Image (cartoon, rainbow, N blue to C red):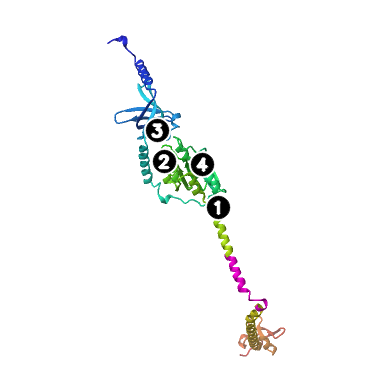
Amino acid sequence: MDSASKLTVSELTELIRRRLEDGFPSVTVEGEVSNCRPASSGHLYFSLKDAGAKIDAVMFRGRLRSLGFEPRDGNFVRARGSLSVYAPRGSYSLVCEEMELAGAGDILAMLDARKRKLAAQGLFDEDRKKPLPRFPETIAVVSSPTGAALRDILNVLGRRAPGARVIVLPAPVQGATAAGIIARRIEQANAWKLADTLIVARGGGSIEDLLPFSEEVVVRAVAESEIPVVSAVGHEIDWALCDFSADLRAPTPSAAAELASGERGLALEAARRAAEGFDRAIRARLDRARLLLRPFEAQDLEYRFRAILQPRLVRFDDAKEALVDNLSDRVSGLSKRLQLAHAVLQAGSPKAAMERGFSVVVNAKTGKVVRGAQDARAGDRLEIRPLSGKIAAITEESYG
């Protein structure tokens, strides 16, 4: 063994690092994402693999913000970056600068699998859908504050619902952080009861651009919203999974504004036409009533009134006279009976008997009335009560 050409481990690793990093300053690799693990620092560590090999990869936090999707295990991606050697472990990895899903077919397959999963959980059921208020007082819009979609919505609402209040909840509509922010805006609108109707919108774009609106966190936030949600993602041919969980799907942002606002002008016009029809109907009835009343002059009306009222007045007078006569006879009979009863009472009155000379004799000691000779004994003190005054007496002898 030639010791003159020996290398230390660090020297050999350094040679390898230079060869690799200098030899592959920029490479584009396609492969399947596996072992995807976001770090607390915000960096994303994962592996790219195919049927025969695997390479470690990393994407730093600053680059992750520009992604139009959230990398997951199983995604087939195309990544561009450079090779880097980590000397302490003697390993090499791909430092990704850019990454995109490798093909629409893979994205559609991923979305289809997610759609089946969420549908199985009932998030797309029709009985969950809520009706939109016809004339909402406040409409909230979750969208990019600088996008054309928001301008279209505001233009339509300004024309169709000038009295409605519009609240813009700003959110990015693409990129790795978009889905989380969109979901938080929907949750905030519900927590603070900001609106009667909620529009979630963005303009058209590629299937990758629309991916945030198909993320599970957004689909669930839309499905769980107590405020009715109109989904307006992309143009007519575009779609996202939040379309299925929303209460109503609009083909464009402008159409969403029309559906959410209702046509106040048309409603006011309909109300005006109804009022005019009601006025015409009332006027027609009044004219007909005037025609019917025209033959009746004031004198005729008085004559007709008297002809109807006079017989009834005569009947009323007759009834009154009969009632008075009956009452008089009744009172006279009752008066005679009362006088007779009074005479009977007077005849049986003790006072009347005493006026005829009768007196009441009472035992002075016991206070009992002496009704017979047996009630008094010799020597009893008696009290004789004539009609007026009292007479004291002593019994000398009683005969019974």
Instruction: Tell me which segment is drawn in magenta.
Output: 281-300
Q: Check disc 3 and report its element: helix, strand or loop.
A: strand
367 or 31, nearer to the observer = 31
Residue 209 picture quarter: top left
Is 367 drawn above or below residue 68 in the view shown? below
Q: Main secondary structure of the magenta part?
A: helix
Q: Nearer the viewer, mark 2 or mark 4?
A: 4
Percent x, y of residue 81: 40, 26
Q: Nearer the viewer, mark 3 or mark 1?
A: 1
- Is-magenta flag for residue 284? yes
In the image, what residue type sits under mark 2?
A: Ser
> What is the distance, in whole Å, between disc 2 and disc 4 at their CAs?
20 Å
Q: Which residue is mark 1?
A: 265
Q: Check disc 1 and report its element: helix, strand or loop.
A: helix
In the image, what residue type sits under mark 4?
A: Leu
Q: Check disc 2 and report its element: helix, strand or loop.
A: helix
Percent x, y of residue 181: 47, 38
Which residue lies at the image location 35% right of the left edge and 23% below the top edge? 91
Q: Which mark is residue 150?
A: 4
Q: Which residue is mark 2?
A: 214
Dot 4 crowding, Cα within 10 Å, few <14, some 14–19, many 20+? many
